[in-house]
Image (cartoon, rainbow, N blue to C red):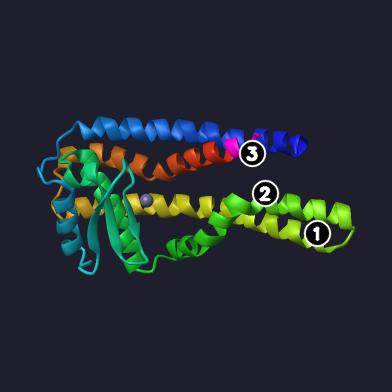
Amino acid sequence: MLLWNWPYFLYVALPIMVLGFIASSWVKQTYQRYSQVRNASGLPGVDVARRILAGAGLSDVTVQVVDGELSDNYDPRNKTLNLSRGVAGGTSVAAEAVVAHEIGHALQDHQGFFAMRIRSGLIPAANLGSQAGPLIVIAGLLLSIFTGSGFGFYVALAGLFLFAAVVLFQLVTTPVELDASRRALRLLAENGVIVPEEQEGARRMLRAAAFTYLTLLYYASLVFGNRRSD
Ligand SMILES: [Zn+2]
């Protein structure tokens, strides 16, 4: 196991951890900075959400408050906008930007945005791949070494495909996130939520919001890296 673990750690886990750490520090710093800046409308996140949803004609989207920090997300399966407590009650530039970003995803879903459909389709394979991909590859290799049959080779190949789904998922995620943030800035301006002086702060916050998934990836790599280093 050790022979396989070191290359995995050096070339896969370590770069993800370093990149993830830099990205997550940047996202958190930006979020904290703009959490201190009051928004011009004085509206808490949940009211910003209602105003933008109404303005964008997304009346079928339900707004819900959930636990956790930066746990905000849009769930296309039940058309629910999940807002973290801090964002739902916050009257800051950070809160309104996060709300608008997630509604950007709701709009992508509503319009059948192509990259988002691919991304949603890849979620099951990506989840399975990140958890079981490397193990399936090893199982396949061991199988072919010890039984000498061709079956093990195909098992290993299946594991590699699952792992490739994870990489593909990350590649598709970035344009989907940047697009959601672009839509968000437009939604904030069109629905009269932000004033021109607020534009630059909102833009910076939205740029960071597009990379929140790297924060999640970072924590996933820590869990995964730990599990693999035994
Ligand atoms: Zn997003």
At label 1, the amino acid type is Gly
Q: Residues within 10 Å of mark 3 (few under 14, many from 20)?
A: some
Whether the residues at callouts 3 and 1 have beta carbons within 8 Å, the answer is no
Image quadrant assignment for residue 5: top right
Residue occupied by mark 1: 152
Could you tell me the amino acid type at mark 2? Answer: Pro
What secondary structure predominates along the stretch shown in magenta? helix
Q: Quadrant of residue 183?
A: bottom left
Q: Are marks 3 and 2 in contact (CB under 8 Å)?
A: yes
Mark 2 vs 1, N-terminal side: 2
In space, the residues marked 3 and 1 are separated at their CA atoms by: 22 Å
Residue placed under numbered mark 2 in the picture: 134
Q: Residue at x 66, y 33 (%)?
A: 10
Looking at the rendering, the stretch of residues picked out in magenta corresponds to: 226-230
Q: Measure the C-alpha gap from mark 3 to mark 2.
A: 10 Å
The verdict on residue 229 being magenta is yes
